[in-house]
Image (cartoon, helix red, strand yellow):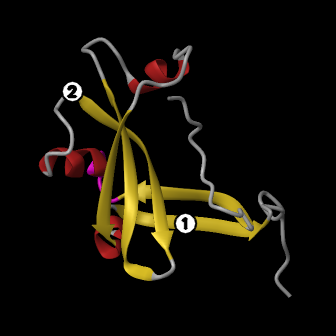
């Protein structure tokens, strides 16, 4: 089954972007391997996190990984994919603080229908 890698919720009242710095180089990859979620040939390529306003203690995270052969690299594998990137999706419910600790910095912007994305603004 083919899906598009993009955030979305039921009504999409607010849309935006996100950016993050991993706590360490390949921190998420290492965490997945140390916790026996992926094999040594698998490499982390993305994630999707879903939070529910009724439970601030945990988040549902889908980690996306790809299996790399010795002569492959992640950018080439993703860009050369003709019929969708071949990923493995690992769904994990995590404590919110455990999820946040994977990152050194984490930033999310949201605006009504995404109208503010990329717009300059002046604080008044």
Between residues 74 and 88, which one lies in front from this camera angle? 88
Give the mark nearest the N terminus, 1 or 2.
Answer: 2
Distance between the alpha carbons at the discs numbered 1 and 2: 30 Å
Element type at mark 1: strand
Viewer-side label of 1, 2: 2
| Pointer 1 residue | 107
User: On the rendered structure, is 42 left or right of 113?
Assistant: left
Neighbour class for label 1 at 10 Å: few (<14), some, many (≥20)?
Answer: few
Residue 78, position as x, y percentages in the image: 49, 24
Q: Is residue 19 above or below residue 32?
A: below
Element type at mark 2: loop
Residue at image location 84% in from the left, 62% down from the top = 115
Q: Residue furthest bottom?
A: 124
Residue 83, position as x, y percentages in the image: 55, 17
| Pointer 2 residue | 41
How many numbered circles are shown?
Answer: 2
Q: Is residue 76 above or below residue 23?
A: above
Q: Is residue 63 a member of the stretch shown in magenta?
A: no
Residue 36, position as x, y percentages in the image: 14, 46
Between residues 80 and 61, which one lies in front from this camera angle? 61
Between residues 82 and 101, which one lies in front from this camera angle? 82
Please give the range of residues in magenta: 23-27
Q: Quadrant of the C terminus?
A: bottom right
């Amino acid at each position: 089954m083919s899906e598009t890698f993009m955030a979305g919720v039921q009504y999409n009242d607010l849309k935006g972007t996100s950016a993050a710095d991993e706590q360490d180089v390949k921190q998420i990859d290492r965490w997945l391997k140390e916790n026996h979620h992926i094999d040594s040939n698998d490499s982390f390529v993305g994630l999707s996190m879903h939070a529910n306003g009724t439970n601030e203690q945990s988040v549902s995270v889908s980690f996306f990984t790809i299996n790399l052969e010795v002569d492959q690299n992640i950018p080439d594998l993703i860009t050369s994919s003709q019929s969708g990137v071949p990923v493995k999706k690992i769904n994990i419910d995590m404590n919110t603080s455990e999820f946040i600790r994977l990152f050194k910095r984490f930033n999310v912007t949201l605006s009504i229908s995404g109208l503010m994305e990329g717009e300059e603004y002046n604080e008044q």
